[in-house]
Image: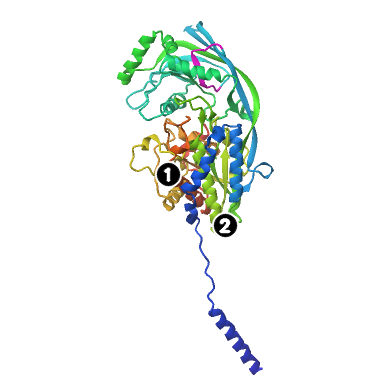
Amino acid sequence: MKQSYSLSLLLLAIIVSACSSTQSPEKINIDAYDFAAAIDTAYIRTHLSVIASDEYEGRDTGSEGIKKAQKYLSEQYSTIGLTPVGDDSTYLQEFELQKSFLKDYSVSFYETEGEEKKLKSLSVTNDQTLAPVTPVWWASSSLEAPVEYVGFGIVNDSVNHTADLDLSGKWAMVSLPPVAEGQSVMASLRPLYGVLIRQAGAQGILIISESDEAYDESAASFQSGLGETLGLELPYLADGETGSRAGRSIANIRPSAAASVLNMSAEEFKAYQEDILEKPESFKGESTGTVLSVEPEVGKGTMLAHNMVALFEGTDPELKDEVIVLTSHYDHIGIGRADSTGDTLYNGADDDGSGTIGLLAAANAMQKAKEAGAEIRRSVLFLHVTAEEKGLLGSRYYSDYPIFPIEKTVANLNADMIGRIGDEYQDSLDQDYVYVIGAEIISSQLDSLLQVGNEKTDNIKLDMRYNDLDHPQQFYRRSDHWNFGRLGVPFAFFFNGTHEDYHRPGDEIHKIAFPQLAQRARVMYGTAIELANWDDRPVVDNQLFIERTQE
């Protein structure tokens, strides 16, 4: 026995010695941030060059161009390795849209005397004639309301062109504000929308064209499109709210017609406008005593549309049932009115090709990190919505019929126009920035995670100038993030600001600022990583935002 025991000890000693002479491998700690570098300009340029090309015809909802984008993005997500969670194990979530066609419309002006009204003029826009009012966007089948003149629509601490007027339910007729050099017309129109409709409650805006000739040119272009799709709606909301501008109308009016509304000659009205511009503080809005009635004749039809859905599955057995949703819209305007060069194709490289490919690049980096062993605990849904340009319809549909329950949706990060240098930064020496809307005005915890994600990636300037629930342009409601926010999901919206090519054919790939686009996509990636790996979930803790979502 004793000899046998000694032999056993000897064998054990040999085994221990052998084991100690071979070092056991250390566990390698893979950090998901190490893969943010995969979101680079080369990757983004390669894919944006495809979907923003002329071949994709501006990606209008329901068009052949957007179908090509669906095919291309599906192929890319399959190559990356993300799971298709759409219909029939595809990357597509199909839904129906109701479309309307404007056949013609009549425009009537009435003089009012007490409770009575007297017809001043009646005109019709059809394939033969032009009325002096042309729709930019109709939200209702008809609209009859008094017209109030609000000058240039200026409202600030020292000037208020809407003072002493009740614009609720009325037409606000407004002169087009002067456009600063290098800025787009839309840069002037957005504040008007915020002031006149969002704040003052006008039912419609009548924008006075620069000249009769300019009006006639735009009206003739519109006339040539009669019979084409006028608008889209979700059928189950067709009698209710369908988007952020639901129930409101915007139209152009011929200056000579605007002068008639004010009982002036064209020359008198031009001088009147010049006087207002010279002394804007002396002008107060005025009632015109005129009622404008617009009666469109509209036909109806249906079409199919598709959101795109690709799932990155989280690594935590419990937390992977919760999702962070990253959104961009992959639709644009398609083919429309020609610009001064004769170009009719709206490529949408920035709006929102930039966000679309920014998400694709983030998905590619995230999957590489996971395959290398990085911990990304929660799942991430890459959601490309359609019909954003038609009233946020694709995101509204997803939020009403989510693939993953809203109560399991941790947050929404939305990228809409992240590929250009906006007007405010054109002359800046430091153009490494992104506008952030949401976050701190919704959830202080989401804001903290975003700050960390930024610091761990590119540490760019997070510009919060539009991050105000009372800002006239109301950006917090104006892209796809709002359809998550209205349901209590905290969101952060990444945005480069407006520029002269917004909704114009000039939004092309050669104008993209690729280094800044990559930076912004990496900051989104970092924010998603922080959300995915945090033990808790960010909560909505701004009471004012909670109240706004109930309005």
Q: Amino acid at mark 2?
A: Glu
Left/right of residue 292 with respect to residue 276 in the rendered view: right
Left/right of residue 184 with respect to residue 73 in the rendered view: left
Which residue shows up at 40% across the image and 47% down it? 460
* Secondary element at tag 1: helix
Callout 2 environment at 10 Å: few (<14), some (14 to 19), or many (20+)? few
Residue 92 among magenta residues: no
Give the quadrant of the N terminus: bottom right
> Which image quarter: residue 301?
top right
Residue 249, how many percent across, how many down?
A: 51, 22
Q: Which mark is residue 124?
A: none
Q: Give the vertical position of 113 relative to 149 (above or below).
A: above
Q: Amino acid at mark 1?
A: Gln
Q: Which stretch is magenta?
A: 128-139
Residue 461, how many percent across, how many down?
A: 38, 45
Q: Give the vertical position of 262 relative to 26 (above or below).
A: above
Count of residue discs: 2
First in residue order: circle 2 vs circle 1: 2
Q: CA distance from mark 2 to mark 1?
A: 27 Å
Q: Which mark is residue 371?
A: 2
Query: Which residue matches tag 1?
Result: 516
Which residue shows up at 61% across the image and 86% down it? 11
- Who is closer to the viewer here, 547 or 535? 535
Q: Can the viewer see residue 415 in this picture? A: no
